[in-house]
Image: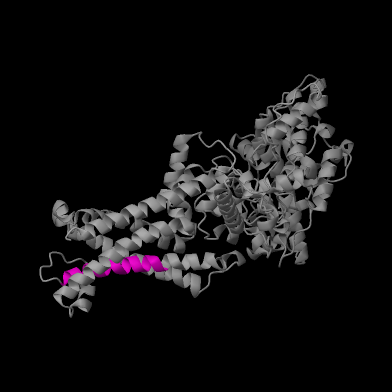
Amino acid sequence: MTTFQVPTLAQMTAEGKAPEVLFWVGCAGSFDDRAKKITKAMAKILHHTGISFAVLGTEEGCTGDPAKRAGNEFLFQMQAMMNIQVLNGYEVKHIVTTCPHCFNTLKNEYPELGGNYHVEHHSQFLNRLLNEGRLKIEGGSFKGKKITFHDPCYLGRANDEYEAPRALLEKLDVSLKEMRRCKKNGLCCGAGGAQMFKDAEKGTAEINHVRADEAMETGAEIVVAGCPFCNTMLTDGVKNREKEAQVQVLDLAEMIALAEDL
Amino acid sequence: MTYLPNILFIAALATAIVVFAKKVGRIRKNIGLGKDTDRSDRPSDRLQNMLRVAFGQSKMQARPVAGVLHFIVYVSFLIINIEVLEIIVDGIFGTHRVFAPFLGSAYVPIISAFEVLAVLTVVAVLIFWWRRNVSKLDRFHKPEMKGWAFTDANNILYIELVLMFAFLNMNALEANFADAHHSFLISQYIAPLWSGASEWGLHFGERLFWWVHILGIFAFLNYLPYSKHFHIILAFPNTYYANLEAKGRFENNAAVTKEVALMMDPSADPFAAPAPDADAPIERFGAKDANDLSWANLLNAYTCTECGRCTSECPANLTGKKLSPRKIMMDTRDRIEEIGQNIATNGSFLDDGKSLLGDYITNEELWACTSCNACVQACPVDIDPLNIIMKLRNFATMEESSAPGALNAMMTNVENNGAPWPFNQMDRANWINE
């Protein structure tokens, strides 16, 4: 991975430089082995486009999303205030993140606590770069491949963004098969609201198994997600049905990195 | 003696209005038991939202069958009320079809149009009844729909049938009068059924149906506040006062912000701060009982018509968990009603040892929510069950420390090392060199 340097904001600031955008990696993106691949894909794309970017590195902390959704407003606000101090200290203006939970919290819940930034989910950011001609995607390797897109709740319903990820996929020339429940009616993967960190209550099925079934019913060879948690949940769902040899679960950033052979 | 019907009518009308107003006042008071929340911003957006969602029924159409049928009943309700206005004027002044001379040749087509709507309503209501009682749509038969909820739903359908039946037959009987002036599109075909009756019998029957129709409407009006059907009124204020922010933006707790700011301020001396107001009641974080919720939450609860679209979209409910967003709303309404009754009986609230969280909504339901907003999206009248769930979680976690153990472990990690998993914060950038 060290073919290029990923600078931290501390390093850049020490050199008297300011990046165009801060890449907010998030906890999953920093620590989860599967999500780290998404992080690396995103870093490669950023490097490829030549945009000056930085990460916070060890100065980044959980946005507080899972704490807030688990009812712990104290812990959430402590995390938020600490992050806001760091972000405001560096005079950060623009943030991109591959995690819809970080995206939602930074965008919607930080302003009231004094953190005002232009926050974009990577699907929005990359789509904008495409439209501005700063990123070019050749669809070659995915041409005609049957894929389906799972709308992350915190990107879709929570923030009404359904088109940016689809516009990116369109550029990859894939054959997009929508699930019965998609966009506004998309079914949750089962991880939101801090469910990722606990066992589900007693029921008749696991939410991620049901959602993985819905994704596979489309006949898709690749299930695309835009969230590290959805990615984990859907990967588990596919494995549970013993379909991991036939069906891949990938992030939007990984799709683009693969298409561009990065 | 000739004025007896007028007097009886005016008495019935006045009683209906007074009793209704009294009950509505009670509900208003109950909603007022909620905590304050500011929904006075963006009035023009709010008006637009109300016109689109409540008046225009935009979210109903997500399910076309129910959407179209509901639209028929709704339009018919709005329009047939013009006829009710005529009936009320007739009733007060002892006139008969007082609008006819004013509307002239338009009168017959107008009443005929009402009759067409009445027939369409009967058809729609019968299909609704079928869906509920025969084809047994899953969402109408969840555990919370037993008992009164189920009876109530059918009662509404029966009342609507009786009203439409009376309206059509009233016109049909009149068509048989020796001096009949009007013949309307639908009732002319019902008229032959009554043709054998005597002139006295026809007049008596016409009056009977006239009274059944209007007294039925008065009764229905007073049934509304006890029924889920109250949504026909509250859908309008509820959509006006709906949350217009992004659904992902959960409310900020300002009381916590104050505490956190104090904790993070190195120069703050907690002992130097004077007690702000020693007599002020101690505010609890989040909501334990229905009156800890906001008035907007309580308005939501009274608006809910128990259609169950929220529950049928809920990922937890779809996978057999106990959580049902509709039940959250029904529980909230039932509990605030109980609190209101308690206050009315005792002068002020007398502790009954019960609370919304625990006695109505269990922890098992509370912790099954994925906060995915599917319920909020699905609600045709912009009810937000998720907001209530989050306030209950605030209480459970911050006041009772009763969150599931795994979540407590996650929160400890966030607190200690800035991530939900037990990784060292210093390893956050390791991915760069891996």
List x then y, in percent, for residue A143. 64, 54
Q: Answer left or right for B103 relative to B88.
A: left
Q: Quadrant of the C terminus of chain B?
A: top right
Camera-side residue: B16 or A222? Answer: B16
Total numbered labels placed on residues in the image: 0
Q: Position of residue B137 (x, y in %)?
A: 53, 69
Q: Residue at x 55, y 68 (%)?
A: B147
Near-viewer residue (A181 or A1): A181
Residue extending furthest toward the bottom = B196
Q: Is residue B244 visible?
A: yes
Q: Nearer the viewer, residue B291 or B137?
A: B291
Q: Identify the main secondary structure in magenta.
A: helix
Q: Nearer the viewer, residue A43 or B7?
A: B7
On the image, which quarter does residue A38 sit in? top right
Residue range highlighted in magenta: B158-176
Where is B130 relative to A40, above or below?
A: below
Q: Please report the residue visible at 43 percent of the width from the left and 54 percent of the height from the top.
A: B232
Give how far across and how far down residue B333 sits, in percent: 56, 54
Quadrant position of the N terminus of chain B in the picture: bottom left
Magenta-colored stretch includes residue A10:
no
Q: In x, y percent, where is residue A221?
A: 69, 60
| Visible residue check, residue A53 | no
> Colour mode?
one colour
Horizontal side of A99 relative to B407 (left or right) equals left
Most extreme residue toward the left is B179
The residue drawn where x is 66% and y is 36% is: B252
Q: Is residue B160 magenta?
A: yes
